[in-house]
Every structure is written in C-alpha cells, then in structure tokens.
Amino acid sequence: LQWLDQQDLRDKIVIDYGCGSGILGIAALLLGAKQVYAVDLDPQAVLSTMQNAAINKVESKIWAGLPSEFEAQFADLTADVVVANILAGPLSQLASTFAELAKPNALIAMAGILEDQVDELRLSYAKWFNLHTLQRREENWCRLSGERLASA
C-alpha cells in the first residue's frame, strides 16, 4: 500500500495478481487508476474482491477473475502497473507472465518475499525487469519493485 501511494496512478491500467481481498487493486483505483484487473486462483478471493470493490464504490472499474478467465478474456492486455503480494515460489514462476502483461517501462511491485529469497527472485526477473528497490519490512519480509525493461 505504501508503494502504491508513492506512485502516480492517474489513468493507469493496473493488474493485481494474487489479489486476495482486492486491497491493492481497490487502493490503486482510489488513488486514481483507470482500470484494475484482479486475478486470483481462489474463487472466494475473486468474490471477496468484488464485494470489497462494491463497498468502496469502485466496482465499475475493476474486473476480478481466475487466471484462466483472465487469459481467455484479455489475451492482448498490457498494463502500466503490475502488483503481486504472493509467495516467492509462485512469483518466480510468473516472471515470464508478468513480462507479457507489463508494457515497456511499466512499474512492478512484489511482496510476500523473504529476505533470503530476494536474489533468486531477482535472477528470475532480470531478463525482463530492472528490480532496483529492496525494502525490508518486519520479520525479514521484503518488497521488490522496479520497471519493465523497454528492450526486453
């Protein structure tokens, strides 16, 4: 949330991958994003995201669904911002997916990473992203952020 608050999200398309309750996507909309695509493997998370979006009166600007639904409906979509708060294993597996989803120079922020997983995760993303920020949080949890390389 702190990272999102520091970005200029006005008129941006945001993908919240592993959306859970939808908090990051909803916050992005409240901070001026144009549209959010919230994706999660858990159907309950998708439902929760839409309920929370309605509570915050942003449901018209958020799409929420499963990865298979997202891929089927938005095969050519690219985003200005990709956020993900999921564990390092899935984040590592999603590197090429996030590269396809992110426009050149798009911003990315990933959380749910333990300090000792940072180097491996950076390597997974190095082909496509410049991950220049490592911010340590409580109990060795970290956030990586950066941008999509224009030439990759």
Image (spheres, rainbow, N blue to C red):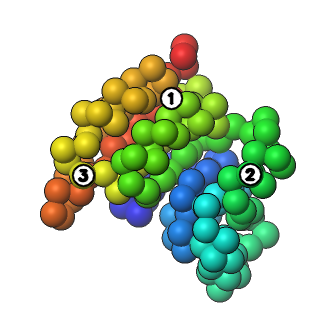
How many residues crowd around disc 2 within 10 Å: few (fewer than 14), some, or many (20 or more)? few
Image height of 130 relative to 6, above or below: above
Sequence-wise, the earlier of marks 3 and 2 is 2
Report the amino acid beneath label 3. Leu
Q: Which residue is mark 2?
A: 68
Q: What's the CA distance linking mark 1 and mark 2?
A: 24 Å
Residue 51 percent coordinates (x, y): 67, 82
User: Residue drawn 35% across and 56% down?
Assistant: 112
Q: What's the CA distance linking mark 3 and mark 2?
A: 28 Å
Residue 93 percent coordinates (x, y): 48, 39
User: Residue drawn 63% across and 31% down?
Assistant: 100
Q: Is residue 30 left or right of residue 86?
A: right
Q: Which residue is mark 3?
A: 114
Image quadrant in which you'd find residue 86: bottom left
Foreground: disc 1 or disc 3: 3
Report the amino acid beneath label 1. Arg
Image height of 107 relative to 2, above or below: above
Sequence-wise, the earlier of marks 1 and 3 is 3
Query: Where residue 148 is drawn, which disc sits there?
Result: 1
Residue 54 percent coordinates (x, y): 70, 81
Foreground: disc 3 or disc 2: 2
